[in-house]
Amino acid sequence: MLTPRSEMILKSIINWYIDHAVPVSSQILVHDYDLGVSSATVRNEMAYLEQKGYIIRPHTSSGSVPSDKGYRFYVSSLEEVTLPISEQRMINHLFHQVEGKMDEWLSLAAAIIARLSQNTAVITTPKPTDCQFKHIELVSIQDSLVLVVLVLRGARIKQQLLNLDKPVKQAELSAISNKMNEAYVDLTNSQIQEKKLELSPLEQIMQSNLLKIMQAEDEQENNQSYLEGLHFMLNQPEFIHNQRIQAIIELLEQRAALRTILPSIPVNQQVCVIIGSENKYEVAQDCSLVVSRYGIPDEAVGNILVVGPTRMAYPKVISAVSYLSILLSGLVAELYGVNPSSIQNQDNAN
């Protein structure tokens, strides 16, 4: 827990570093901010923040920069941020200038978010949400041949023949079916993987096959993406000499690869921020991701993703992503003949 003074100085460090991309010294803080304390006090507070891991010094003789922990504190302490009314009006005006086609909406939205955030923006087209497990039947056909009958949400039925290493009795297959039906009902592929369930070797084989079927079903859906603002990322000081930037760009340009960095967040959670080392994938650990889902829960959902350095203007980015998420959700609702207010009501209920 930071004291109000420590918090004030940490936020001043972050705000200055976001604007200038240069390590911050105590002299800079005293000169540029009316902190109401002496330079000695500022130095002591900065030493404390460094000791607690909120800031780091790239070199012993240099100033300080925020750590991932410092940015996380900063983001978590943000009060509700909203896009200025003038920018909301500008966005609405731009959307009224394009035809009522999804591809034009999403291309425009990606361009707007990239410009507002000065980072790279990716928007995926809305698609049916990840398939959900409903029921499975494992039927012994002959010897070691098993018929897998998987029922997904929406009455989608998938069948597959599975050849095992050795014969298995129907009673054992039925027991495995019952166990999965009880444990996995209404879960998605990722939720099944996260669920801690003790499985025998045979059950692990069945679960692995189940996940492959569900993953194939998820990936076959059309999920076109719109990418804008790569030049903003390339111009960021953090990435000019960063050897990982090429890998990051390749990841963003490969539509299927987006699934590896898009976190699983509920459609009703407006904005999710993943900072630096919080990313599961090493290639993205020099970046921060600001993500939101938009669309109609349980019907058609897309993703809005902003990728940039951890030195990101978080209030600006979060407010832009949040506003475009709400706007695009309303447009998708109109296409599907759904009252936009009902989406808002459902989100509040969740």
Image (cartoon, helix red, strand yellow):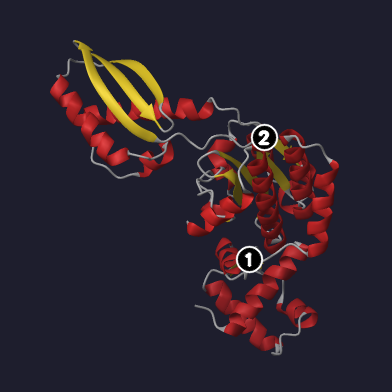
Q: Earlier in the sequence, mark 2 or mark 1?
A: 1
The answer to which of 28 and 94 lies nearer the viewer is 94
Numbered label attached to residue 66:
1
> Relative to 210, is 175 on the left or the right?
left
Q: Residues within 10 Å of mark 2 (few under 14, many from 20)?
A: many
Numbered label attached to residue 225:
2
Residue located 20% across and 24% down the image: 173
User: Mark 2 or 1, which is nearer the eye?
Assistant: 2
> Relative to 172, is 9 on the left or the right?
right
The answer to which of 87 and 56 lies nearer the viewer is 87
Secondary structure of residue under mark 2: strand
Q: Position of residue 226 (x, y in %)?
A: 71, 36
Quarter of the view holding residue 269: bottom right
Q: Is residue 49 above or below residue 95?
A: below
Does any portion of residue 21 appear in the rendered image?
yes
Q: Amino acid at mark 2?
A: Ser
Residue located 67% across and 42% down the image: 334
Task: Check the image and name the residue furthest to the top.
Answer: 142
Numbered label attached to residue 192:
none
Quarter of the view holding residue 27: bottom right
Q: Position of residue 266 (x, y in %)?
A: 50, 49
Q: Is residue 172 above or below residue 112?
A: above
Secondary structure of residue under mark 1: strand
Q: Residues within 10 Å of mark 1 (few under 14, many from 20)?
A: many
